[in-house]
Image (cartoon, rainbow, N blue to C red):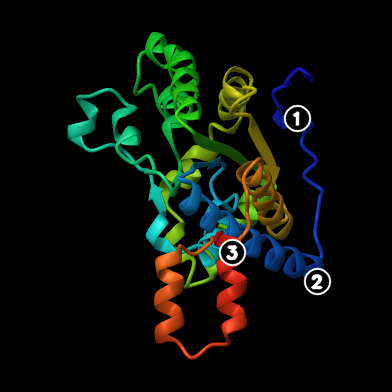
Amino acid sequence: MTKHHPPKLADVDLSKRLSKQDYFEELVDLQAQLALIQQAFLFHGAKGVLVFEGWDAAGKGGTIRRISQALDPRSFKVWPIGAPRNYYLNRHYLLRFWERLPPEGAISAFDRSWYGRVLVERLEKFTPVERWRAAYREINDFERMLVDDGTRIVKLFFHISPDEQMARFTERLRNPMKRWKLTYEDFRNRERWAEAEVAVDEMLARTSTEIAPWHVIPANNKKYARISAMRAIVDTFSKDIDLSPQHLDRRTLDAACEALDVDQSLIDSLRARTE
């Protein structure tokens, strides 16, 4: 087995781009595959967790929207993670994530995640040094438990340059439909970009494991980032699982035969697959 090498921000090629035509062709294909994956998860009782981290304005939300378009919301849930309420401040930081993990057959996406412990809480000094340092081991143990329990995990970090981030902030300021996304914290966070890079690289080095590796997504081009992220999800979630459409049980086929005006050949072909 090839040894896993954690990614580094400095190794990411931010010049990667995707044409509009290629983007839409790949988007349609990946969304169709995601729909098949969701059906397979429901049928086989598999579980999936998506972790979205990255710089402010890096494109996490846009990618989540394209994924959401392909999936039935009854078994796909997006959890936007902000500052914890007082209830959670007095308890272990992983508790609120345990409570939001998917049941069998479902997929949960975390827009920000438990990695806030070693990013925001580290940078803002919300947590003592010894506690956020202990979080690397705690998080690896947590993810190991999830994988051992049958959960597939895809961790995505959206990486952009400081100049690209400033261009997106400018776009948000000028666009009334995007202005709500811009906050004072966005500008304050930029002042700690160098510190944040150190924290991100340490996070990648300490928590990118064989069972739950990090995918650093070059996100200066939004189209390339969305496709790259969705492909990573499809590759992980589709591995070693039958994506064929679910077979109907005999009782359902008998009822369909009596109630529906369809060719008997269709019922017979479906019955043959079931048997």
Q: Position of residue 105 (x, y in %)?
A: 44, 49
Is 90 positioned to the left or the right of 218 in the image? left
- The residue that label 3 is drawn on is 171
Foreground label between 3 and 2: 2
Seen as rendered, the residue at the extreme top is 130
How far apart in space, not on screen, are marks 3 and 2 (Cα)?
Answer: 23 Å
Task: Measure how far apart labels 3 and 1 are at the Cα level.
Answer: 26 Å
Residue at x 55% of width, y 65% of height:
70
Disc on the earlier residue, 3 or 2: 2
The amino acid sitting under disc 2 is Gln
Q: Nearer the viewer, residue 115 or 38?
A: 38
What is the C-alpha distance between the residues marked 2 and 1? 29 Å
Give neighbour class at mark 1: few <14, some 14-19, many 20+ (Cα, 10 Å).
Answer: few
Left or right: 130 with respect to 165?
A: left
Tell me where residue 8 appears, x and y as whole percent.
71, 27
Q: Which residue is mark 1?
A: 10
Q: At 51% from the left edge and 28% from the top edge, which residue is drawn?
A: 147
Q: Looking at the image, how many numbered discs can be counted on the residues?
A: 3
Q: Position of residue 43 (x, y in %)?
A: 48, 53
Helix, strand or loop at label 1? It is helix
The label number, if any, that marks residue 21 in the structure image: 2
Q: Are marks 3 and 1 in contact (CB under 8 Å)?
A: no
SS under mark 2: helix
Circle 3: residue type: Glu
Q: Earlier in the sequence, mark 2 or mark 1?
A: 1
Sequence-first tag of 3 and 1? 1
Q: Is residue 114 above or below residue 24?
A: above
Q: Quadrant of the N terminus?
A: top right
The residue closer to the viewer here, 250 or 156, is 250
Q: Nearer the viewer, mark 3 or mark 1?
A: 1
